[in-house]
Amino acid sequence: MNPFAYSRAATMDAAIQTMESRTGAAFLAGGTTLVDLMKLDVLAPEQVVDINSVPLSEISVGGDLVRIGALARMSDVASHAEIQSRFPVIAQALLASASPQIRNMATIGGNLMQRTRCPYFRDTFWACNKRHPGEGCSALDGDNRMHAILGTSEHCIATHPSDLAVALAALDATVQVEGPSSKRSIPFEEFHLLPEDTPDHETALEHGELIVSVDVPISTLAARSRYLKVRDRASYEFALVSIAVAILVEHGTVLDCRLALGGVGTKPWSLPEAAQSLCLRKADAVRFQAAAEIALAGAKPTSQNAFKIELAKRLIVRALTDLATESARE
């Protein structure tokens, strides 16, 4: 680990001002990603700005949305009664993430900003365009079983690791951001960027900007949601494929639907076309399978991860079937 300066900010303005004055600075919240990558010499910030004293941990319920503070801990959000009842997909995604110890430390904002688990990114011996643009992508011809099949480019095929982000991608969430000169509301679909020619640019945040909160609209659809995750082992493992699904069924017909996949995309992968194909259609296996085919139509597997295509299709059908069956029983 390289030497670095440390400071603690008591207010949001102080944190932003410190970041603005130091181009090599980084925010420290739970530290469950930043500290790991500093130890591996993947990241070497000149200054670490501790923001844990900034009051951004509140979870508030308004008339039409829930606002989750960026410094709210994952475990607190997962156990919050309003989150569990209004957004079960969020609670389930958080509980499927990491370990209890990490969830007690990790924050919501930090979870959205976490870096890929690609081993070539995390080991400085290997070429990686996320670390050093133009260096190359070792995963293209390497061990790529865990890598992306959607949203890839010739420069990067790393998956986004967050479970929570998949749930938020299915719920029309908005990320509230504050920076040196302005406040912004970023639709969740626009927050994470595709790698394309610049895989080192992963989010829409500009230097000095800080995530303030995540706003999630309250709806009947969101209350009818679920998160499923397929992984190599039952605990503390990243997804091979995961799905966030919300579906509203009445008298056997789909009235509304949202779908998003994890473990297969270079960013949390929403599926608007597949979801739209189900609306005002009969909720049955034929329609669900057709939606799954639409969802994976653009997949580009590499040498070791073609199995994710069929696995993702089956998970989509399973999630839709389970929720539609529950609706029929009510």
Image: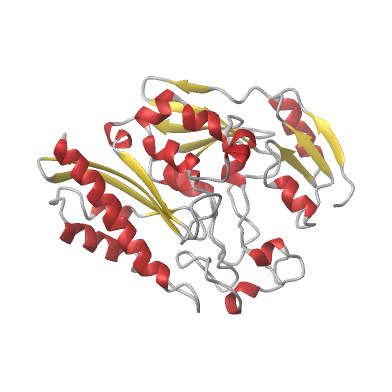
Measured as percent of width and height from the top left, residue 170 is found at: 38, 45
Task: Using the image as rendered, state which of residue 198 and residue 135 is in the foreground.
Answer: 135
Res 51 quadrant in image: top right
Chosen colour scheme:
secondary structure
Q: Residue at x 52, y 47 (%)?
A: 191
Q: Is residue 283 above or below residue 187?
A: below
Q: Is residue 83 above or below residue 235?
A: above
Measured as percent of width and height from the top left, residue 162 is found at: 53, 49
Residue at the left extreme of this rendering: 251
Res 173 quadrant in image: top left
The quadrant the C terminus occupies is top left
Res 107 quadrant in image: top right
Measured as percent of width and height from the top left, residue 3 is found at: 90, 47
Q: Residue at x 66, y 35 (%)?
A: 179
Q: Residue at x 53, y 66 (%)?
A: 147
> How many discs appear?
0
Task: Using the image as rendered, state which of residue 191 and residue 3 is in the foreground.
Answer: 3
Residue at the right extreme of this rendering: 3
Measured as percent of width and height from the top left, residue 77 is found at: 50, 30
Q: Is residue 21 visible?
A: yes
